[in-house]
Amino acid sequence: MAETKKKPAAKSTSKKTCKAKPTTKKLSVTIDKELYTAMEEYLQEYGYSKDEFVKKAIAEKVSREKISTMIDDMIKL
């Protein structure tokens, strides 16, 4: 049986691909025990995960600040 030799693979002329940057970021927060306990009670009552709750709280705060700034700007006119 004759052996067949494989041809070496041609070198790629394209640039190396970079790893995609993550579309999310991690956040670490330290809060006091009382606030943490209140948050846990809220999570149990409303069925949110910590992750989901924090995301919603940040989004709500940012939205509220934007609305407040828009109202302030309208009053100044």
Image (spheres, rainbow, N blue to C red):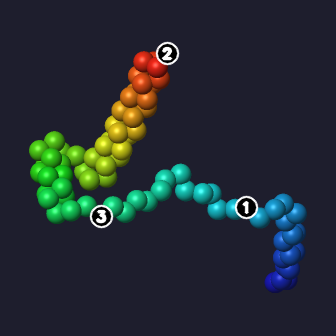
Q: Is residue 29 above or below residue 73?
A: below
Q: Is residue 34 above or below residue 56?
A: below
Q: Is residue 6 visible?
A: yes
The quadrant holding residue 62 is top left
User: What residue lies at 85% left-to-right and 65% top-to-bottom?
Assistant: 12
| Left or right: 67, with 30 as reference point | right
User: What residue lies at 83% left-to-right and 83% top-to-bottom?
Assistant: 3
Give yes or no for contact between labels 2 and 3 (Cβ–Cβ under 8 Å).
no
**Label 3 residue SS:** loop
Judged by depth in the image, the label closer to the viewer, 2 or 3, is 2
Q: Is residue 42 above or below residue 16?
A: above
**Label 2 residue SS:** loop
User: What residue lies at 43% left-to-right and 29% top-to-bottom?
Assistant: 69
Q: Position of residue 50 (x, y in %)?
A: 26, 53
**Label 1 residue SS:** loop
Q: Check disc 1 and give the amino acid type.
A: Thr
Residue closest to the eye, 30 or 76: 76
* Residue pointed to by mark 3: 30
| Left or right: 72, with 10 as reference point | left
Quarter holding the N terminus is bottom right
* Residue pointed to by mark 2: 77
Q: State how far apart marks 2 and 3 are (Cα).
A: 41 Å
Q: Position of residue 18 (x, y in %)?
A: 70, 62
Q: Check disc 3 and give the amino acid type.
A: Thr
Q: Check disc 2 and give the amino acid type.
A: Leu
Label 2 Cα neighbours within 10 Å, binned few <14 / some 14-19 / many ≥20: few
| Left or right: 55, with 46 as reference point | right
Disc ID at residue 17? 1
Q: Is residue 73 above or below residue 40?
A: above
Give yes or no for contact between labels 1 and 3 (Cβ–Cβ under 8 Å).
no
Q: Earlier in the sequence, mark 1 or mark 2?
A: 1
